[in-house]
Every structure is written in structure tokens, then in C-alpha cells.
Image (tube, rainbow, N blue to C red):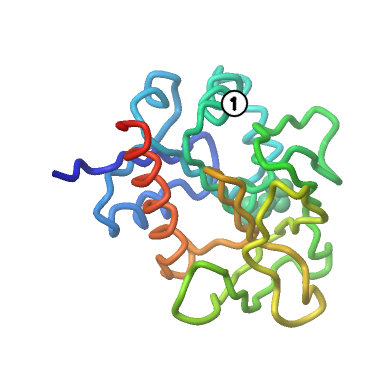
Amino acid sequence: MTASVIIGVLALQGDTREHLHAVAELDAVGRPVRRVDELDSVDALIIPGGESTTMSKLAVEFGLLEPIRKRIAGGMPVYGSCAGMIMLASTILDGRADQVPFGGIDMTVRRNAFGRQVDSFEGTVDISGIDGGPFHAVFIRAPWVESVEDSVEVLGRVNNGPAAGRIVAVRQRHLLATAFHPELTGDLRVHRYFVEMAREAGKTTEG
Ligand code: GLN
């Protein structure tokens, strides 16, 4: 018997709908999360792309900052894309002074790293652990990962262009982050990988 894993998508701001669509394609149950009781009902959480400064402000206003931090500390699988990656970082460069991340991944990310002139950038990224060839990655005012601690596994770097070699996909145990937006290109492999992480975590908790 395999009960469907319930994947929440943080719905304070950003491209929540696209992530919910991706989850629905993958035989998992997707639910928007705006309130603490909604957070309590999910097995895993996706933090969408959007604007991390606004998301951080709303997380505080909606009383979600500490509850999400607690779930992260308790082992809930979380995937952050773009702004979501920033929300999972322990340290943010070029952030706003009042910006508070959830944290969880021991990394330093730089906001809007691809530069002001190049608002968006497309490239290819190979992700270790995900077969099927490189991702066509769309970066929209995206961060990159400036540095990681040893606890963090680097899963992918930009293959080409001016940002070649920059880290844009990482995993630390139950936490996954990409600087790009697979939810916008219809490539479901990152979401499939994450749903699998959530299923595995569920098995461990059930014993
Ligand atoms: N620049 C945005 C931020 O700082 C992230 C952009 C995105 O999620 N597409 O949060």
C-alpha cells in the first residue's frame, strides 16, 4: 500500500501554481500552504520562485517563519527554486537588511547574481543523480551559490556562458535547492526527484 505523499507549496507569493501543476503530474497530492494548520498537514514543502524579500516579510506576517524552521529542523523535505533557494540559505549576500531566510542549507547565496544587465539567462545544467541529459535551465534574476560548507552536496553547475562553473543546484540531506525554475520549462525531473525524496523520508518516519 502506498499512500500518496502530500507536497505543500508555499503560497505567500511567487509561482505557486506552476509547482502545484508539476506535483499534480507526478502522482502526489499538492496543497497550497499559507497558514500553520496547512503546513501541519503536509509531508514536504516546495518554496517557489518569486521575490525572496517579499516572501520573507510575508512569512513573518503570516506567522510561518518559526513553524517552517521547526519543520526543517525536524527533517521535513523541502525544495526551493530560485527565491526558494535564497529562503533556504544560511547566509544571503546582496539581500535586504531586514530579510530573514528559513535557512537549513549551509551555503552562501548571492541574490540577483547573474547581473543587473542580464535579467534572465538560459543555459544548461547537468544534475548528478538525475538522468536524461542536461537541463535547459532558465534563470530569472536568479541567485547562484557563492560557497558551500562540507555538509552540502553540489549537484549541478552552469555548463556554459559567462556564469559557467557557478553552483546552481545543491542538496543537504532532506533539503534541495535550484537557482533555476524547472517548473517553468515543463521538465518534471527535479520535481520527480523531490517527490522521491519525500516518499523516502515518509518511509523512514513510519519505521
Ligand atoms: N531575485 C529574486 C529574489 O531575490 C529571485 C528571482 C526568482 O525567484 N525568479 O528573491
Residue 133 position within the rendered picture, expressed as x and y whole percent measured from the top left: 50, 82
Q: How many marks?
A: 1
At x 83%, y 62%, the residue is 116
Q: Which residue is mark 1?
A: 69
**For the residue with label 1, is its CB less than 8 Å from the closest atom of ligand 1?**
no
**In which quadrant is the N terminus drawn?**
top left
At x 56%, y 17%, the residue is 63
Q: Quick one: SS at disc 1?
A: helix
Q: Is residue 91 above or below residue 152?
A: above
At x 38%, y 19%, the residue is 37
At x 65%, y 66%, the residue is 139
The quarter of the picture where residue 64 lies is: top right
Q: In the image shown, does 199 or 114 lie closer to the viewer?
A: 199
Q: Residue furthest front?
A: 207
Q: Residue furthest left?
A: 1
Q: Is residue 85 above or below residue 165?
A: above
Q: Is residue 174 above or below residue 196?
A: above
Residue 84 position within the rendered picture, expressed as x and y whole percent measured from the top left: 60, 45
Residue 77 position within the rendered picture, expressed as x and y whole percent measured from the top left: 48, 40
- In the rendered structure, the answer to whether residue 3 lies left or right of residue 39 reads left
Label 1 Cα crowd, 10 Å radius (few <14 / some 14-19 / many 20+): some
- In the rendered structure, the answer to whether residue 47 lies left or right of residue 169 reads left
Q: In the image shown, does 168 or 18 lie closer to the viewer?
A: 168
Q: In the image shown, does 175 or 63 lie closer to the viewer?
A: 175
Residue 207 position within the rendered picture, expressed as x and y whole percent measured from the top left: 31, 32
Three-letter residue code for mark 1: Arg
